[in-house]
Image (cartoon, rainbow, N blue to C red):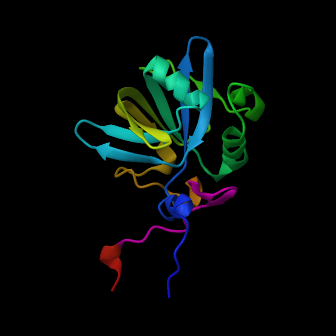
Amino acid sequence: MKREISLDKANRLLNIGGVVLITAKFGDRDNVTPVAWNVPVSKEPALVAVAIAPERFIYELIEKSKEFAINLPTLKILKEVYFCGKNSGRDVDKFERTKLTREKAKFISAPLIKECIANIECKVESIYPAGDHNLIIGKVLRAIVEEKLFDDHLKVNLEEAKTIHHLGGSLFTVPEKIIDVKKIA
């Protein structure tokens, strides 16, 4: 038996994707914020999309700079991820408060996060209004991964990495194992 749920909670049915930390910089201000609404949208050219509400400080920095970075956090920094989501970069330097380490990117001014296991540098390709959020399409300029955590096919070692996934509110989960459907009898 199934029950109907309120439409404002429907996103939670799809919201189990990996949480990323978005970084952006304009002028002398930078910021970091978690985003669970992210997805690759093209392989050629390499494009990604993130949904961010226009009133967020990170959105302002992305809109002005036309660039951002996607950083893949793990369970090791879950408290820092949560802090970044609960506090505004307008009011607090999240890097300073969380002790996350800024690293210089190769093609953009936005910092990368050293504690993350992968980083993607992006230039804004386009922005589309989408209800109370805007969909930001970024062209991938560079992607780097922590060598010891990814094999040659970029399959992540989940036992070591423990990527985090948002379930809503203060609830998160981590993947337990990788299942190869070809090996299921």
Q: Where 35 sits versus 75, above or below?
A: above
Which quarter of the figure has residue 32? top right
Residue drawn 71% across and 30% down? 94
Q: Nearer the viewer, residue 81 or 178?
A: 81
Whether residue 176 is in magenta: the answer is yes
Q: What residue range appears in magenta? A: 163-180
Q: Nearer the viewer, residue 20 or 170?
A: 170
Q: Where 26 sits versus 69, above or below?
A: above
Which quarter of the figure has residue 24? top right
Residue drawn 47% across and 61% down? 14
Query: Would residue 154 appear left or right of 61 to someone viewing this image?
Result: left
The picture places residue 121, in percent across and down from the top left corner, at 43, 29
Whether residue 23 is in magenta: the answer is no
Residue drawn 52% across and 32% down? 54
Please say whether residue 162 is visible from this viewpoint.
Answer: no
Query: How many numbered circles are shown?
Result: 0
The picture places residue 26, in percent across and down from the top left corner, at 54, 16
Please say whether residue 97 is visible from this viewpoint.
Answer: yes
Query: Would residue 105 appear left or right of 74 to someone viewing this image?
Result: left
Residue extending furthest left?
44
> Which secondary structure type mostly characterizes the magenta part of the structure?
loop
Residue drawn 54% across and 24% down? 60
Which quarter of the figure has residue 159? bottom right
Q: Quadrant of the C terminus?
A: bottom left
The picture places residue 29, in percent across and down from the top left corner, at 62, 17
Residue extending furthest right?
97
Residue extending furthest top?
27
The picture places residue 88, in percent across and down from the top left corner, at 69, 32
